[in-house]
Structure formats: structure tokens, C-alpha cells
Amino acid sequence: MTYNPSKMCLDCLKSRVDLASEISKHQTLQFCRHCGKYNKPPWVRADLESPELLQVCLSRIRGLSRVKFADASFIWTEPNSRRVKVRVTVRGEVEKALLEQNCVVEFEIVDTQCEECQKSFTPHTWNSKVQVRQRTHHKRTIYHLEQLILKNGAQKECLGIKPKDNGIDFHFGSKGSANKFVEFVKGNVPCQVKFSKQLTSHDAKSNQYNYKYTHLVEIVPICRDDLVVVPQSKHQSKLALCYKVGSTVYLLDAASLQPLEIKPEKYFRNPIYPLAVRDQLTEFIVMDLEAEKDHHIAEVARANDENFGEEVFQVRTHLGRILNPGDSVLGYDIARMTDLDTKEVDIVLVKKLPPPKKPKKLRRLADVSEDKDYTKFEQEYSEDD
């Protein structure tokens, strides 16, 4: 009696055909415990049972290219088991019948170190260092720069990152990588750069010199919402509010609401320092609002006064488009906090008081203990967004 496969039922056909015979059922995944990346290659960051990790697993399966791939999904495993299981569905045509079969590929997670972490643990491997510093009692601009670096991936070529008292040190393997990073910093915060180099070795026979380079990046110690005194001449000065910090410091004349700009080159020739910062803001209530030609006049009263409403101030403000009577607004109470001659301005309104909002957890460049300043920055960052 001859065997005729066309007369076999579909279930028997499935039991006799192994479409996934070319696939290797046991694989390994290289995992760097220091930075949390998997080797695809290249090294990529991925969470357990995430689409990124599934893509890494599929790229590591040997023999998958020899079959028609249909679908893949994770099978739950204990996170501490150091095992990842992927259910792979393959498809094929046998005896004019379209078959689909599942197979389970098990991955063993093997701890290792990626190339970047190997370099960071090896002493004296860095060639250039960028020292980012801001000489101020709070680190708001440094924290903001840290988020910009993470958002744009500017730290990818760093060999090591070390937090310091007044900033952060970034180590690079080449001078070109350090220059690229310095240009990124200069494009996002107002700063000046000082360059130096140190001779590390010298080969007299071949006349070769080896240097280590250092870039000192000094950030302007003025942050958003700071109040400053801008000198106009030897005997005159004006109050100004910093409403934006980019590659230039943008100010607003507190009396006339005229915009001012201070470029880093001009600032470091004649430095000025904050007169008041966010910690000194006072809450006011908007009693009335009147629109003028190019600004608004707001009537405000101190929110914490015992006799609320007895003393009302008329303030020229740039916030008129977003304010309404009854709103709470934060500002500087000039008359109560300084002895400067500021007859033109008694109150400088800074921003509308946002509703309570749960701060979102921000990523950090390095594993450092969070302090009160950073917790406060997370709250302000969420409110500003």
C-alpha cells in the first residue's frame, strides 16, 4: 500500500510537519547591568516585555530568516529568573495547505559590560573633559540643561559623568566629541568657554605629544523668573525680570515692559547678579484687570494680608492675556524686600499660580542622591510644562 500525503487530514499533516525546525530554541541575551542596555547589536535600552526588547530578541534568533515569520509575543517569566521566553509563530505551505505553527524560544540573560561602560571603568581613558559650572545657590539651570541633554541624547559619546558641587563633569574619548558637546551647551544656555590643555606624555624620537584637554563652561548665574538690576549709567539702573533663558538672557523692563537682551559676551564683561529669586515670590490676588494699548493694568492685593483688600496696587503687567479677576498670581513685593530706590515699581508680577499638579519623575544623567532643590525643580518643571 502506497503512502499518499494528499489524503492525510489537516491534523495529521500538522503533527508530521515541523516548520520551525530551522529555529534554534535556546539563545543568550547580553545585558549590561551598569547602564541597563541589551546587545542587539548595537547596545539599546529596553524594559522587560517591551517592544524594544522583543525586537532585540527577534534579531538574536538564529534560523528565523529561513522561515516565513508571522507573529511573536512574550511568555511571562519571573523577573528574577534571568530567563526570557518568546512565542514565535511561523507560516508555511505544505501540500497546498497553509499551516501555522508556534515554537517557544528561551533566552538566558548573561551579564556583561558594553564598550562604553568598559571605557568608563578603565582609568585614564578619557582625552577631553568638559566642566559645566554655574556659580549660584540654586541649580535650576543645571537641572534644566540636564533634561535637554537627555532629551537630545547629547551624552551618548560620554565615557563618564560625575556630579560636582556647582555643576557636572563630562569625560570624552576625543577632543572632537568634547567640542561637539560644548557647542550643544552653548546653543541652549548662556555661557562662556575657557580652554586649556595639559601635556601627559612626549616621545622625543618621533616628536609626538599627547595632551588632555579641558573645557570650562561657565553658565550665567541668572535663571528664569529672577529679578535683576541692570545698570544704565554710573548713577542710573533699572529693575528687570528674566522671562526666558536660551543662548541669550531675555529680560523685561519692570517699569516699561520693554524687552532687553544680554548676550553672554556682554554679560561676562560687566556681570550682574540676581536681586531676588523664585523663593522670594509673594502671592497676590487679581482684583480687576484693564487693557491698555500694548499691556494690561492689574489691580492686585496681597493674599496673606490680615485686612485683605485694604491695600490695592495697580501694576503694569505682561500677563494680562492669561489673567482674570480672582486669579492668584506670584510676584515680587519690592517695597517689602529691598532698600533700593524703586519708586517706579512696587510690585513685579512674574507668573500665574498654576493649579496643584503631581510632579513627574525625571531621568538623571548619573546616579546621585536627590536633594530638596531637585525635588522643587521637578515640581516647577511640571508646572511650567
Image (spheres, rainbow, N blue to C red):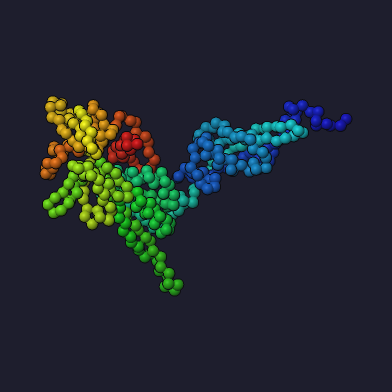
Residue 355 lies, in percent from the top left, at 30, 29
Q: Quadrant of the C terminus?
A: top left
State left or right for residue 385 relative to residue 4.
left
Q: Residue furthest right?
A: 1
Frontmost residue, 190 versus 145: 190
State left or right for residue 150 relative to residue 29.
left
Residue at screen point 31% across, 58% down: 194
Q: Residue furthest front?
A: 293
State left or right for residue 21 relative to residue 362.
right
**Figure label count:** 0
The answer to which quarter of the image holds residue 223 is: top left
Residue 175 lies, in percent from the top left, at 41, 59
The answer to whether residue 89 is visible is yes
Frontmost residue, 178 versus 17: 178
Residue at screen point 42% across, 51% down: 158
Residue 221 lies, in percent from the top left, at 26, 48
State left or right for residue 157 relative to residue 217.
right
Q: Residue furthest bottom?
A: 205
In the displayed structure, would residue 85 be above or below residue 128?
above
Residue at screen point 61% across, 34% down: 71
Frontmost residue, 260 versus 150: 260
Q: Quadrant of the N terminus?
A: top right
Residue at screen point 35% across, 49% down: 188
The answer to which quarter of the image holds residue 7 is: top right
Residue 285 lies, in percent from the top left, at 21, 29
The answer to whether residue 171 is visible is no
